[in-house]
Amino acid sequence: MATKKIIAICQSGGEFETNKDGSLSYNGGDAYALDLDQQTQLSDFKQELAETFHCRVEGMLIKYFLPGNKKTLITISKDKDLKRMVNFFGDSDQVEIFIMTEERVARNVSNMPASRSSRTTVSEAVVPAAVPVDVMNYDDPIDMDAPIKIQNLEASADINGEKHIKAIVQWENTITGVDQRFRSFTEFREALHKYSIAHGFAYDYKKKDSHRVTVKCKSEDCPWRLYASRLATTELICIKKITGKHTCEGATVKAGYRTTRGWVGNLIKEKLKVSPNFKPKDIASEIEQEYGIQLNYTQAWRAKVRAREQLQGSHKEAYNQLPYFCEKIKETNPGSVATFATKEDSSFNRLFVSFHASISGFQQGCRPLLFLDSTTLYSKYQGTLLAATAIDGDDGVFPLAFAVVDAESDDNWHWFLLELKSAVSTSQPITFVADFQKGLRESLRAIFDNCQHGYCLRYLAEKLNKDLKGQFSHEARRLMVQDFYAAAYARKPEDFERCTENIKAISPEAYNWVIRSEPDHWANVFFGGQRYDHMMCNFGDLFYSWVEEATELPITQMVDVLRGKMMELIYTRRVNSNQWGARLTPSMEEKLQNEASKSHSLQVLLAHDSTFEVRGESIDLVDIDHWDCSCKGWQLTGLPCCHAIAVVERLGRSPHDYCSQYFTAESYRLTYAESIHPVPNVEKLVKSEQTNALVLVTPPSKCPRGRPKMKPAGSIEIIKRQLQCSKCKDLGHNKRTCNKKHKNDESDALALTSLAS
């Protein structure tokens, strides 16, 4: 494959002139066109230039402008530089190249623009050009005991290609010379900081006050100095004098170059907009690659925190915005519930939110079934999120309400359930699937009339495993937990008894634990409510994944992120459901068809009136009028089982007429009929009488040190394998650490002695 060539417009004999905007133009001289490609060697190219311009190769300098930059000249001093230039201009057909001699540069050094390979400071004769920069606060250092190192940019550019050129191109001319003006000292410090990185030197402030500043190179022998002061009767800062040239050649950059978390945060702020989960180690790596700045993990983490605060706002301010934010939720989403409570010292205690679209959707189309669960928030001030999620007709999670509380406690759960009761005013009994903790059980009974409380199997299995830990082998405990789940899902009493007898055969103690754990709250054969075969409270994993994504945001923004996710979910499901042509939702239609395929081989006999006997692998009785089958599948799931379908088809009826109303496409559309509306972005506290009347104090607890512990997944397999000694067969240790080792050795020695005698 042929290598693409570009045309090099080679110019020599002219002069550079500085324009008003700081860019450079080349006037006069001669120009010739030569071709270049990736295979061109610098020595051959120089020889051709020497023949073209009738000059010597010795002392020849070759320079060019980077694409889109007419302020900084880049020097070509080796083959890699030449290939890099060809790469930069790979998308264009030509490049301008300027040929100079070292003698000419020496005679006109005051008029020469800064170059990448030159450490010479821009002279006072250069026409100044103001460079606008972001205004930042540099009063908060990262860690004065942990210096940030800056690599020699020219050397690192050779190693990493064009990556470090980014800093050089952007920052080499942030300081242009005498009479350059800045809007403030903050802007001046920003420009100086970037300039020092681009030119590879460290600096100190010799004098600094509100009117003037003196900057010197950190190298003791380097004569470079810069003087700036405030212009009289203005707020502008002007560079008055730059003396000396850098002789340090970047030798001081490893001596402890310091920066601030705010300054580094400014570099990564744009990256966080694109990648909010940018990890500190990746931040440190990318900053080093692009700018030559070496950060340790702590510095990168603190810079990320500062950048996030600049993007997202203050956590403390977010708590003060809660009164206004709650009012805006109710204003933009009429019928919603948004309320908060404080402690006696006015510090934040809890926040409850339930949108009208969620309340209406639950009442109009969802099963009267709610899952209660919690998850820890790993924000600056921690806290816990309590949530009530429902289930739509397609077995999808439907967030109903959530609360942010200072800690998970019986009191906070009681408050949450009271708010939930006021939001969901329904006389229909609700079945709850939740933890079995005492406070939650008592609150449910006291607040919701005729409710049923199904214990979450995951929490029960964890407790069973914890209580039996250390007494049984891994395999024995695994089998007991497996039988426990089978007992919970069993549909007939005899199946439940068989599973519990299996547990009893392994351990009578475990059997007693199971019997005492109130099976009427978790076993299908005894439970009085309708769970539709959903046995665990972590059903809403989709919702909790949203919480995990937004957990580090300030509280108002976290709530708004959840609102946005719910808004999008409702809209998407509403649009999708309008395309359905079947009578049931897709997942329920599929389940019904699976049961129908099993019914073809069954024999149906009329027993009495509406009762039928269905024969297959077993004999079951179906009461078609009462929607009842002795297999209990119809009652537990809400869909007719294969036995019921066989009877229905024998009667020439449609199985769809015997499905729960909650599984119809019509109920599903009612669930998502209402919309959640946007809430104005609350970035600054709106001054009003209501907001001025109450100032919330942030919670006293802060996020602890170390990696946060994540919420355990809701998997059935919760048992970790235990060590088992191969010598004594006890658990919790191996044969090397066995305490009975010496006793066994003694018994072996006695046995050998008796044999010898």
Image (cartoon, grey):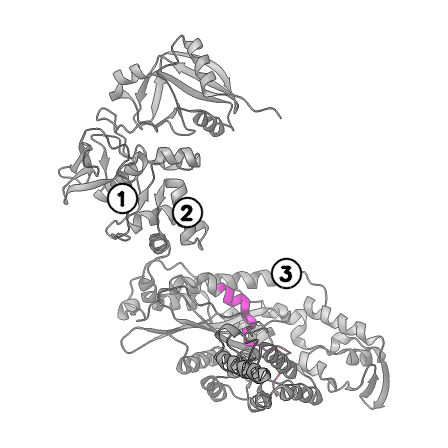
Rendered location of residue 438, percent (x, y)? 46, 86
Q: Which residue is mark 1?
A: 257
Query: Mark 3: which amino acid?
Result: Asn
Q: Amino acid at mark 2?
A: Ser
In the rendered structure, find residue 576 and report the number of the disc placed on it: 3
Q: Quadrant of residue 513?
A: bottom right
Q: Mark on residue 79?
A: none
Percent coordinates x, y for residue 503 in the rendering: 63, 86
* Sooner in the amino-acid sequence: mark 2 or mark 3: 2
Q: Amino acid at mark 1?
A: Tyr
Residue 566: percent from left, percent from top: 52, 64
Residues packed near mark 3 inside 10 Å, few (<14), some (14 to 19) or many (20 plus) = few
For discs 3 and 1, the disc positioned in front in the rendered view: 1
Which of the two discs, 3 and 1, labels the residue nearer the N terminus?
A: 1
Q: Secondary structure at mark 3?
A: helix
On the picture, is 224 further left or further right than 49?
Answer: left
Q: Nearer the viewer, mark 2 or mark 3?
A: 2
Number of labelled discs?
A: 3
Is residue 251 positioned above or below 350 on the image? above
**Which quadrant holds residue 720?**
bottom right
Picture layout, residue 734 above or below residue 568: below
Considering only order in the chain, which callout, 2 or 1, is on the residue closer to the N terminus?
1
Q: Which residue is mark 2?
A: 285
Chain part drawn in magenta: 529-546
